[in-house]
Image (cartoon, helix red, strand yellow):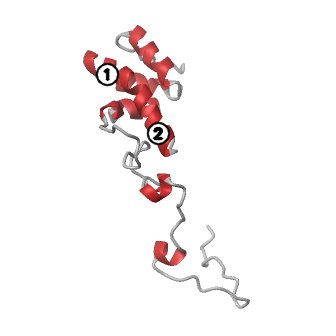
Amino acid sequence: MANKKKTITPEEPKLFEKFWNEYAMKLDRIAAVRAWNNLDKDLRRAAIDGIQHYREICEALGVRRMWPQGYLNHRRWEDEQEDPTPTLPCMGGSDMHRSDATAAKGNYSPPSQEKATGRRDSGNEDGGGSLPDMAIW
């Protein structure tokens, strides 16, 4: 049986190409086309118009932008953010992206092992600490 690639055509192809080029993160085009096709004409234009503001916010926060389909699916152009402060999670709400005020100022330090796991490192005999025993599969 021959392996046929399924192609997906964007609605309003010229407008999609404008979005694709302006967003400038050319990753997973098929998913981006699917997300694009789920938007109506007004939302597509709004998405393109909001790219620059979204890019500025992410740069100010020091976080990576979402992939194109994420930007479209989550309608990030609708985020109400006049001034780029650390309240906007550009990557979708993970604590790993340090979206609090301290992180934005560069004063971030990861939580201690005790805080993160609820237990203390037992340490080894020389006091240097060690990783907890782990199962090897």
Image coordinates of residue 111 in percent, x first then y, are 50, 69
Image coordinates of residue 39 in percent, x first then y, are 29, 23
Give the Cα separation between the discs numbered 2 and 1.
18 Å
Q: Which residue is the site of mark 1?
A: 46
| Element marked by disc 2 | helix
Residue at horizontal 50%, vertical 18%? 21
Q: Looking at this view, is 16 or 59 the one in front?
A: 59
Q: Looking at this view, is 12 or 97 the one in front?
A: 97
Q: Residues within 10 Å of mark 1 (few under 14, many from 20)?
A: few
Mark 1: which amino acid? Ala
Mark 2: which amino acid? Cys
Image coordinates of residue 14 in percent, x first then y, are 42, 8
Q: Is residue 122 above or below residue 81?
A: below
Q: Which residue is the site of mark 2?
A: 58
Q: Is residue 126 above or below residue 23?
A: below
Q: In which quarter of the image is the C terminus?
A: bottom right
